[in-house]
Image: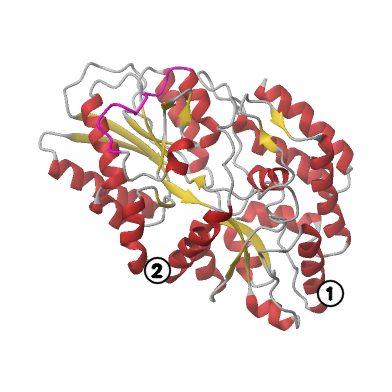
């Protein structure tokens, strides 16, 4: 299925545990934006029913605090969101305020769809600089991160104990150490060492590339890694498959399609998997016990750390809004108010507002608190995060998946998988 303008991107839900599945989305009327009255805004976001419910409460609190303001909503799950947003934009009815994502931010900004947020009354003073930089292009802020997440390896300590092993030192371990560890778990138990549903995630590969002083993308928007680096990545996957440290190709594909609640980690048949820190609580509910958060391997093996703090998602605004003042007030309320943060907690990442982040920490659920502690401990060891992805980056998950599945089944070698990825990715991002 193809997007129509402005994005021109193909969209397929990444078969990765933890991402939202497809769903139909109510569309904002695609009939062109009327002049409208001051205080009448449209707002669009994706998420679960829980997110919809608490976001509506935030909207109600904002409307109560701002007499005469009314907000019309449009909601979706991840799979239907970008088609719905694209239809609205193409019809001249861009939402006044919307959730956005790093893969698409540059494209919408460079097509003059997004409003620069720097001078519309949003208080930036307490916002995490790492969050702000993630939404800035050419010196202007087109998206403000709702909060931050970091990738981590979630590990089931009960399975480690069953294997008679010790938890590795995640501050010093290498990818070779990781491979040996998950292979040993598989050999000593009836569990798999790693679920292997994340090795086609471009964010995880980006960490691997950054550890070598490279990056998924350059600031100029080209691919920023060598073919040798990607071939090494795919070779690690095929070596793990051969060692039976991960499930069979069939099982990996089935698990990814079934969703995170059916992944080996979630069902207790796998010891580890890579997830974002804001997903810890949900995974622990599925497992029924506490999981350990470990740093991604390889952080001390190369010239620099690869881990970074990723804006979970962005708040952005439509360039053709008729009421910049109220848009600024709403985004400021979403980011900075007690009412908003108390309802959101860490669902949209650890809050971007540093004072609010500190304020809510003592009252967070245990899993969220451990995720926050993980980020706090990790932050001093990080280097600058990656640049905003180029136009066309929304196609990269599809391309990774088209390479990953044939690789697992032996239809591609690591070398030919790299060749195919480079060819398709270079075409996608121009």
| Magenta part of the chain | 111-123
| Residue nearest the observer in this picture, 391 or 226 | 226
| Residue nearest the observer in this picture, 44 or 308 | 308
CB atoms of marks 1 and 2 within 8 Å: no
Q: Magenta: predominant secondary structure element?
A: loop
**Residue shown at the point (48%, 64%) measured from the top left:** 373
Disc 2 secondary structure class:
loop
Q: Position of residue 88 (x, y in %)?
A: 40, 24
Is residue 344 in view?
Answer: no
- Could you tell me how far apart the alpha carbons at marks 1 and 2 are, in whole angstroms? 35 Å
Left/right placement of residue 407 relative to residue 47 reads right
Provide the residue designation for mark 2.
Answer: 365
Number of numbered discs? 2
Instruction: Choose top left, top right, bottom left or bottom right for residue 59.
Output: top left
Q: Position of residue 180 (x, y in %)?
A: 82, 67
Provide the residue designation for mark 1.
Answer: 187
**Residue shown at the point (84%, 58%) measured from the top left:** 241
User: Which mark is in front, 1 or 2?
Assistant: 2
Point out which mark residue 415 bears: none
Looking at the image, tell me whether mark 1 or mark 2 is earlier in sequence order.
Answer: 1
């Amino acid at each position: 299925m193809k997007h129509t303008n402005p994005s021109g991107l193909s969209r397929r839900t990444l078969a990765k545990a933890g991402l939202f599945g497809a769903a139909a989305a109510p569309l904002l009327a695609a009939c062109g934006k009327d002049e409208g009255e001051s205080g009448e805004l449209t707002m669009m976001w994706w998420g679960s029913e829980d997110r919809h419910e608490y976001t509506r409460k935030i909207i109600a609190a904002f409307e109560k605090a701002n007499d005469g303001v009314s907000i019309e909503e449009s909601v979706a799950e991840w799979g239907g969101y970008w088609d719905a947003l694209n239809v609205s934009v193409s019809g001249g009815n861009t939402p006044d305020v919307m959730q956005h994502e790093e893969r698409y931010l540059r494209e919408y900004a460079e097509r003059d769809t997004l409003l620069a947020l720097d001078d519309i009354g949003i208080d930036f003073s307490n916002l995490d600089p790492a969050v702000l930089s993630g939404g800035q292009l050419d010196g202007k802020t087109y998206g403000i991160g709702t909060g931050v997440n970091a990738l981590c390896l979630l590990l089931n300590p009960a399975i480690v104990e069953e294997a008679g092993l010790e938890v590795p030192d995640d501050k010093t371990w290498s990818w070779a150490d990781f491979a040996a560890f998950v292979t040993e778990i598989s050999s000593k138990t009836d569990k798999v060492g790693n679920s292997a549903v994340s090795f086609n995630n471009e964010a995880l590969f980006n960490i691997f590339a950054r550890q070598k002083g490279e990056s998924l993308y350059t600031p100029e928007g080209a691919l920023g890694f060598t073919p040798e680096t990607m071939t090494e990545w795919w070779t690690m996957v095929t070596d793990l498959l051969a060692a039976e440290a991960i499930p069979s190709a069939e099982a990996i594909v089935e698990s990814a399609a079934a969703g995170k609640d059916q992944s080996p980690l979630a069902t207790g048949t796998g010891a580890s998997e890579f997830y974002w820190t804001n997903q810890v609580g949900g995974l622990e509910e599925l497992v029924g016990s506490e999981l350990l958060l470990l740093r991604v391997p390889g952080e001390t093996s190369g010239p620099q750390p690869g881990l970074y703090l990723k804006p979970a998602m962005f708040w952005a605004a439509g360039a053709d809004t008729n009421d910049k003042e109220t848009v600024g007030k709403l985004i400021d309320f979403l980011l900075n108010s007690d009412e908003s943060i108390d309802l959101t907690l860490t669902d949209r990442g650890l809050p971007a507002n540093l004072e609010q982040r500190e304020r809510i920490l003592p009252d967070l659920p245990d899993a969220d608190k451990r995720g926050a502690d993980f980020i706090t401990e990790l932050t001093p060891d990080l280097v600058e995060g990656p640049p905003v992805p180029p136009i066309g980056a929304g196609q990269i998950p599809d391309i990774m998946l088209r390479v990953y599945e044939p690789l697992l089944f032996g239809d591609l070698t690591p070398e030919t998988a790299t060749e195919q990825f480079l060819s398709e990715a270079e075409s996608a991002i121009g």
